[in-house]
């Protein structure tokens, strides 16, 4: 187990290296001009001399490989560089925003797993029953619905029609302090939308797993021995039904990240999403590279986590080390 | 900066730890949100704006046109855009050769951190902006400065490279404290997010892409503001801004004309219409065989129906434009208004040898009267203007193909293809006209996009910026506007009004003449520090 974790970590280094270079290459090939993005509307009246000076100051006149190498060597010493679009050190940008994104994503993940598993077990118990049919068709619909569309729908219904939840932001508009109660009420809609958009995957896997397990010999045997329905369901069926879901936990991480980007934008959530979009369209190399490393690391960690969980839950699987 | 990073990291870790607890209690804690703001205390105001500044550091361009809330300039502008002293005690003394400007500074002014304001802060501000390593994209506006120095604690002397009449107008630029901003990296330092100034408000909190909150500076030299808390919520979407204004979450907002109309019957809200210098025009590059022909330019100038554009595209919230100077401005040359005259446009083209071909499109010497017109993709207003212009031109026998693109796509084509452009800055007629029309600036960045070159206009532009005599300047700018009738390098279409809807809870609201930029300074809240709650 430790060997597997170690091997994966060693493997992560070259992956991250290739990914960051890829980001620099793609950004350099994009039609966006970092100088124009930096100058904004002031660039429309700036002289060519002024723009050239800006280009040199931002290092945008350097060749791709030089820029990447400079960034990489600085990053290894702990200096993530400065974000040109936000006029702030990259470490500050990430420090200010990452927490809120993690809060949103973690809450949503929890909602998806808890609700997905619960509903999956209930539906898997009686495949074809009314609950199964209702929830399953809803799950297929949700699977096809984009997260931002769900977000707009939620704002329309809960914030505008019912007026029970705030439409956006981290706190009330007039307030400039961050309190627990305010953040909690502002978190409900975005976390619910993000969670619900991830829910179908967990639900469908658990439902199938539990339904299949209930048909298997060990479970039938357990029933025959007169064990209570509760023990059969939770002790036997859920245990084997959970296995495919554990793999899912890791593989849903990238989906969660992209989903969070859209949901944050819809709800003006001050997380890392707006920064990511700005970094990309402004060809803000240092910020973009740092964010990509973070996302890649999250995905690699997610995969490792699901493999470890799988190995622990089912000893037959073992670890690939 | 170290402290900030640690703080951020701790907040991140804390937030992550909270996640589980929150998930369980979130539903229980939920309460109707968003209503505590708008109808709250009389000394708070919350407004919705569409654009967020990249920085709050004047060294990087924030507040360069005045009204920066956190900062003061040497001078400031009143409701009629007339200059009046702020951190200076009076308007500057100008030497006879118009190359030296001397400002006497107000005494006893303190920055909000308690440190005194002195002449060295002024010198620091200007010389830092002009330094090559400072990434201020607007520094070209201070191009005339040769040297700035302090003469004692309360006098600042600017020396110019060339006589520049509108120079005093540029000194509304905010002054930053050297003892804070001088200790950090000008491009990425904390100052951009934790500014310290002499202004009527202090920054309470800037939550990026969410809101900027200000609190009154109780020791402001101009008297403590009565609106104690002032928040600008950043809401990019027009509909969401209107909805949040209606729900009481906001006290005021900038709105497009069609959404502002929805509040006309609301007794508790008032609509303010700000006159602007914000124009839309079409560049007619000299390098193109069609648009470079004076006959075609003049014909287009007459064929375009500006009144219809104002009525249909702007819902009446705007004015026909005949040049960068709006018709309502004292600098406008009366008599240069052009009527919509399609017959005259056709006549001009006929006489110049542009004969209609089989498909109704004119031709001359084998050249078809056709050219592309670019507009910024995603900008509905520009798209509508471009389509209307193309349809008007078609009636005169000129075929315009409209195409959309980002600036990256448009820029390389600007030299010989037309662009639906926008701009406008009030304050001085030199600001727009010099960069728009000076022949030596043809193709310099985004200046003089049409590569316009007219010796009479060039001379008048120089006369206009050199002279300190208002009558001489007025004559120069009149000349330019009359030359533009004879040889238009651009077709000016409209000047666009900006509309604001605000709760009727305060006295003292008004609007200034506004620029093209939708900065924080614009809107009825340009002077929020002098608002008083209604009894």
Image: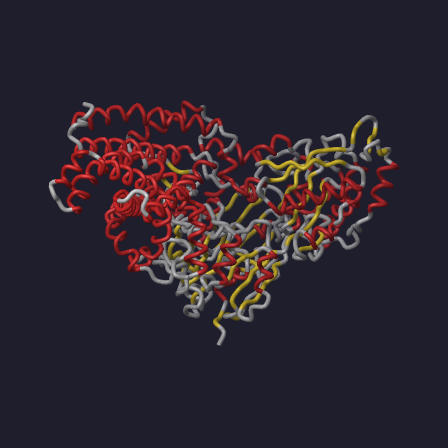
Looking at the picture, tell me which residue is in the foreground, B117 or B227.
Answer: B227
The residue shown at (24%, 31%) is: A304
Q: Is residue A3 visible?
A: yes
Quarter of the N terminus of chain B within the rendering: top left
* Residue B391 locus on image (x, y percent): 74, 42
The residue shown at (41%, 32%) is: A285
The answer to whether residue A214 is left or right of residue B137 is left
* Residue A225 locus on image (x, y percent): 11, 41
Name the residue furthest front: A224
Name the residue furthest bottom: B535
* Residue B284 locus on image (x, y percent): 71, 37
Looking at the picture, tell me which residue is in the foreground, B163 or B326.
Answer: B326
Q: How is the image coloured?
A: secondary structure
* Residue A45 locus on image (x, y percent): 59, 41
The answer to whether residue A44 is left or right of residue A216 is right
Looking at the picture, tell me which residue is in the foreground, A135 or B390.
Answer: A135
B417 vs B214: above or below: above
A2 vs B402: above or below: above
Looking at the picture, tell me which residue is in the foreground, B255 or B226.
Answer: B255
Name the residue furthest left: A225
């Amino acid at each position: 187990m430790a060997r597997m974790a170690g091997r994966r970590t060693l493997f992560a280094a070259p992956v991250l290296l290739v990914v960051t270079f890829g980001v620099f290459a793609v950004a350099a090939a994009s039609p966006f001009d970092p100088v124009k993005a930096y100058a904004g509307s002031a660039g429309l009246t700036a002289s060519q001399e002024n723009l050239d000076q800006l280009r040199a100051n931002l290092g945008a006149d350097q060749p791709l490989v030089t820029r990447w190498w400079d960034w990489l060597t600085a990053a290894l010493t702990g200096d993530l560089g400065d974000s040109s679009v936000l006029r702030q050190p990259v470490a500050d940008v990430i420090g200010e925003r990452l927490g809120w994104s993690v809060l949103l994503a973690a809450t949503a993940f929890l909602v998806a797993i808890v609700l997905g598993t619960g509903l999956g077990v209930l539906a898997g118990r009686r495949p074809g029953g009314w609950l199964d049919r209702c929830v399953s068709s809803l799950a297929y619909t949700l699977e096809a619905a984009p997260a931002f569309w769900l977000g707009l729908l939620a704002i329309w219904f809960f914030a505008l029609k019912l007026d029970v939840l705030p439409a956006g932001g981290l706190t009330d508009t007039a307030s400039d302090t961050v309190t627990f109660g305010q953040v909690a009420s502002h978190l409900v809609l975005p976390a619910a939308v993000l969670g619900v958009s991830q829910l179908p995957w967990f639900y469908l896997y658990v439902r199938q797993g539990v339904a299949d397990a209930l048909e298997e010999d060990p479970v039938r045997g357990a029933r025959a021995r007169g064990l209570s329905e509760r023990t059969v369901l939770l002790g036997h069926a859920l245990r084997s039904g959970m296995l495919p879901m554990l793999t899912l936990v890791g593989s849903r991480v990238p989906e969660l990240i992209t989903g969070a980007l859209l949901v944050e934008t819809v709800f003006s959530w001050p997380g890392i999403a707006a920064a990511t979009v700005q970094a990309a369209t402004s060809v803000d190399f240092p910020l973009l590279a740092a964010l990509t490393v973070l996302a890649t690391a999250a995905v690699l960690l997610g995969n490792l986590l699901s493999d470890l969980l799988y190995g622990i839950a089912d000893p037959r699987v073992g670890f690939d080390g | 900066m170290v402290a900030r990073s640690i703080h951020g990291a701790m907040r991140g870790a804390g937030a992550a730890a909270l996640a589980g607890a929150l998930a369980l209690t979130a539903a229980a804690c939920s309460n109707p949100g968003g209503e505590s703001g708008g109808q709250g205390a009389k000394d708070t105001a919350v407004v919705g704006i569409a654009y967020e500044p990249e920085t709050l550091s004047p060294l990087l361009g924030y507040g360069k046109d005045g009204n920066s809330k956190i900062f003061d300039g040497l001078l400031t502008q009143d409701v009629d855009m007339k200059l009046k002293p702020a951190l200076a005690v009076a308007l500057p003394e100008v030497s006879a050769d118009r190359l030296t400007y001397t400002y006497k500074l107000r005494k006893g002014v303190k920055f909000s951190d308690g440190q005194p304001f002195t002449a060295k802060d002024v010198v620091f501000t200007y010389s830092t902006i002009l330094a090559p390593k400072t990434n201020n994209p607007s520094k070209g506006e201070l191009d005339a400065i040769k040297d700035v120095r302090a003469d004692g604690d309360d006098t600042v002397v600017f020396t110019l490279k060339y006589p520049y009449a509108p120079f005093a107008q540029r000194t509304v630029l905010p002054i930053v404290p050297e003892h804070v901003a001088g200790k950090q990296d000008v491009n990425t330092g904390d100052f951009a997010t934790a500014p310290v100034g002499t202004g009527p408000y202090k920054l309470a909190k800037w939550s990026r892409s969410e809101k900027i909150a200000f609190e009154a500076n109780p020791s402001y030299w101009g008297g403590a503001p009565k609106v104690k808390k002032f928040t600008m919520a950043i809401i990019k979407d027009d509909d969401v801004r209107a909805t949040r204004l209606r729900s009481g979450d906001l006290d005021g907002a900038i709105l497009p004309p069609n959404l502002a109309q929805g509040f006309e019957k609301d007794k508790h809200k008032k609509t303010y219409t700000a006159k602007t210098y914000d124009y839309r025009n079409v560049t007619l590059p000299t390098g193109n065989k069609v648009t470079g022909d004076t006959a075609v330019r003049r014909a287009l100038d007459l064929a375009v129906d500006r009144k219809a554009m104002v009525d249909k595209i702007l819902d009446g919230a705007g004015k026909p434009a005949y040049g960068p100077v709006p018709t309502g401005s004292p600098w406008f040359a009366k008599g240069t208004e052009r009527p919509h005259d399609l017959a005259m446009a056709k006549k001009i083209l006929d006489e110049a040898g542009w004969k209609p071909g089989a498909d109704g499109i004119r031709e001359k010497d084998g050249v078809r009267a056709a050219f592309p017109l670019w507009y910024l993709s995603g900008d509905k207003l520009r798209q509508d203007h471009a389509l209307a212009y193309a349809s008007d031109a078609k009636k005169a026998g000129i075929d315009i193909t409209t195409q959309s693109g980002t600036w990256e796509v448009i820029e390389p084509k600007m030299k010989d293809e037309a662009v639906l452009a926008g701009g406008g800055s009030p304050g001085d007629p030199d600001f727009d006209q010099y960069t728009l029309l000076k022949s030596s600036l043809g193709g310099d960045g985004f200046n003089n996009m049409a590569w316009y070159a007219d010796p009479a206009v060039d001379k008048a532009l120089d006369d206009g910026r050199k002279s300190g005599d208002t009558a001489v300047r007025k004559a120069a700018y009149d000349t330019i506007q009359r030359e533009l009738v004879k040889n238009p390098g651009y077709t000016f279409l409209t000047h666009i009004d900006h509309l604001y809807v605000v709760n009727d809870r305060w006295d003292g609201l008004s609007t200034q003449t506004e620029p093209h930029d939708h900065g924080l300074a614009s809107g009825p809240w340009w002077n929020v520090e002098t608002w008083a709650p209604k009894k």
